[in-house]
Amino acid sequence: MTAEPRREQLLNAADRVVQREGPSASMNAIAAEAGITKPILYRHFGDRNGLIGALTERHTAGLLAAVRSALNEPLERRDRVEHVLDVYLAAIESRPQVYRLLTHPEPGDPTGAGNALAPALRRIAEEITRAIQQQIDLGRDGPLLSETWGRSITGMVLAAGDWWLETRPCPRARMVQALADLLWGRLSAAADLPPMLAAPEG
C-alpha cells in the first residue's frame, strides 16, 4: 500500500477513536485501532499535533465545501439562510467528538488542538461575506456591512451551535429556525443586487 492510502486508513482509525473516546483520545489508542505500533503512527504524522492537523484539514475542508455549496444554492433568500445553517449544524452533529476536539483546548494545551478550527472559521466568514456582497444590496455601506455581517454571523452560529451540541435543548430543525429568525430581520429588509451588479466571484 502506498503512503497516501495508508495515511487515509490511519486518519479513519483516528476518527473512529475520537468519536468513541472524545478529544482526549491517545496515540496509543489510535495506533491500536489501526493495528500498528505507535512509532509507525509517529512516522506518518510526526506527533499528536501533526495528526490533529491532518484531521483538521480533512474535516474543515469538507465543512467549508459544504457551506460554500449551500451559500450558492438557487433558493429564495430565507430558504438559503436556513439551508446554510442546517448544513453547519448537521456537520457538527454528525461528528460531535471530532468537533469538540477541534474547538475546545485540552487542559494544559491552550495552543493545541482546541484552536485548530480557527483558520477554517475565518474562511467560512470570508465565504459568507462574499455571498452577501454578491447577492444583497447594502447601499454605500455595503463593504463595511458585509464584512461585519459575515464575521458576526459566523461567530454567532459557532457559539449557538456549540451550546446546542452540548445541551441539545431542541431538534436541529428548531435550532435552524431560531437562528434564521434572529438573522432574518435585516436580511429580509435589504434588496437583491441586480445580476449585472453582483460582485464577481473571487
Image (cartoon, grey):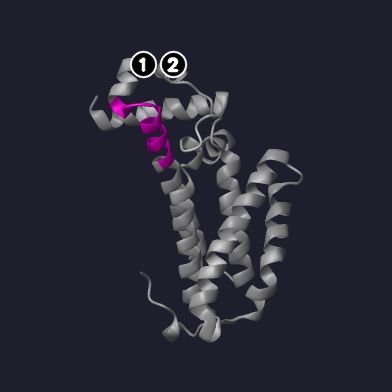
Chain part drawn in magenta = 44-56
**In x, y percent, where is residue 129?**
49, 68
User: Relative to residue 139, is residue 72 depicted above or below?
Assistant: above
User: Relative to residue 81, is residue 140 depicted above or below?
Assistant: below
**In x, y percent, where is residue 21?**
56, 23
Q: Amino acid at mark 2?
A: Asn
What residue is at 46 percent from the left and 63 percent from the top? 127
What residue is at 24 percent from the left and 24 percent from the top? 1
Quarter holding the C terminus is bottom left
The residue under label 2 is 28
26 or 181, nearer to the observer: 26
Q: Amino acid at mark 1?
A: Lys
- For the residues labelled 1 and 2, the Cα–Cα distance comes to 6 Å
User: Relative to residue 193, is residue 2 depicted above or below?
Assistant: above
Q: Dominant secondary structure of the magenta stretch?
A: helix
Indicate yes or no whether the magenta region holds residue 52.
yes
Give the SS element for disc 1.
helix
Image-based side of 185 in relation to 155, left or right? right
Look at the image and tell me whether residue 58 can be seen. Answer: yes
The residue under label 1 is 38
Residue 183 occupies which quadrant of the picture? bottom right
State yes or no: discs 1 and 2 in contact (Cβ < 8 Å): yes
Give the SS element for disc 2.
helix
